[in-house]
């Protein structure tokens, strides 16, 4: 049996709330593989969720939610041993602050901790196109050990709706974290 993971999920205010929703739903199905799921949502993330999904269902998930400035959250310190952090969707502003080492809220502090502890930081970027500033920030985070996983859905699994399409990105993201689950694999 695989070791249970402690995972941090941060949701920034970038468009793409469907990705956060699908990530939350998938994590519910993987509860036997998780010890803890800590969530940080920016105010903009909550507004975007309400606007794009027409609900506040993020309030109904049974995860541990933390306020954006709660530096007493366990994953604000490396000693809490959270193994992975997913920022989904990740805004370019959040990327820039992480690349610059600016820990001005719980999301950027947790990302800084994950990087310094050499654990998995996965940024699910949703913006397009990229400016050179964005590309250089992605390069900086990658060189520091982070993983850039753009929200670029795939189509070879023939997704039938928006959630299945978003799942092609979320499945890849959770696979990067080491979760084991049934998913579409090319050639199988």
Image (cartoon, rainbow, N blue to C red):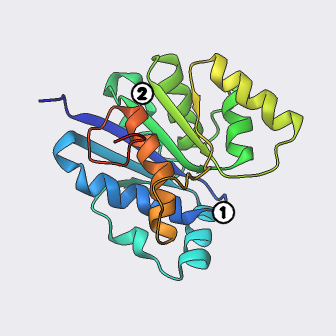
Direction right: furthest residue:
132
Number of callouts: 2
Can see residue 73? no
User: Which quarter of the picture shows residue 146?
Assistant: top right
- Residue at figure coordinates x 82%, y 43% from the top left: 130
Query: Mark 1 falls on what kind of element?
Result: loop
Task: Decide if residue 10 is on the left or right side of residue 134.
Answer: left
Task: Decide if residue 24 is on the left or right side of residue 173.
Answer: left
Direction front: furthest residue:
187
Q: How crowded is mark 1: few (under 14 residues within 10 Å), some or many (20 or more)?
A: many
Task: Tell me which numbered mark, 1 or 2, is placed earlier along the sequence.
Answer: 1
Q: Residue 77 carries which label?
A: 2
Q: Name the residue under label 1.
A: 15
Query: Mark 2 falls on what kind of element?
Result: loop
- Residue at figure coordinates x 43%, y 41% from the top left: 186
Residue 28: x %, y % from top left: 27, 57
Q: Which of 151 and 117 is in front in this view?
A: 151
In front of the other: label 1 or label 2? 1
Residue 122: x %, y % from top left: 52, 35
Residue 167: x %, y % from top left: 45, 56
Contact, mark 1 vs mark 2 (Cβ under 8 Å): no
Direction bottom: furthest residue:
54
Image quarter of the C terminus:
top left
Spatial distance from mark 1 to mark 2, Cα to Cα? Answer: 29 Å
- Residue at figure coordinates x 54%, y 32% from the top left: 111
- Residue at figure coordinates x 47%, y 16% from the top left: 118
Q: How crowded is mark 2: few (under 14 residues within 10 Å), some or many (20 or more)?
A: some
Task: Decide if residue 72 is on the left or right side of residue 165.
Answer: left
């Amino acid at each position: 049996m695989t070791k249970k993971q402690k995972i941090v999920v941060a949701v920034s205010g970038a468009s793409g709330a469907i990705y956060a929703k699908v990530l939350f739903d998938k994590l519910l199905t993987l509860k036997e593989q998780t010890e803890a799921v800590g969530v940080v949502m920016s105010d903009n993330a909550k507004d975007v969720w309400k606007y794009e999904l027409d609900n506040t269902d993020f309030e109904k998930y049974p995860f541990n939610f933390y306020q954006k400035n709660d530096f007493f959250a366990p994953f604000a310190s490396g000693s809490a041993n959270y193994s992975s952090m997913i920022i989904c969707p990740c805004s370019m502003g959040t990327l820039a602050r992480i690349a610059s080492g600016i820990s001005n809220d719980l999301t950027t502090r947790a990302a800084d901790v994950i990087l310094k502890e050499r654990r998995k930081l996965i940024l699910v970027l949703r913006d397009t196109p990229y400016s050179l500033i964005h590309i250089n920030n992605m390069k900086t985070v990658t060189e520091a050990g982070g993983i850039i996983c753009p929200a670029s859905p795939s189509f070879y699994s023939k997704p039938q709706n928006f959630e299945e399409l978003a799942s092609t990105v979320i499945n890849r993201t959770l696979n990067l974290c080491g979760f084991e689950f049934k998913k579409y694999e090319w050639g199988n």
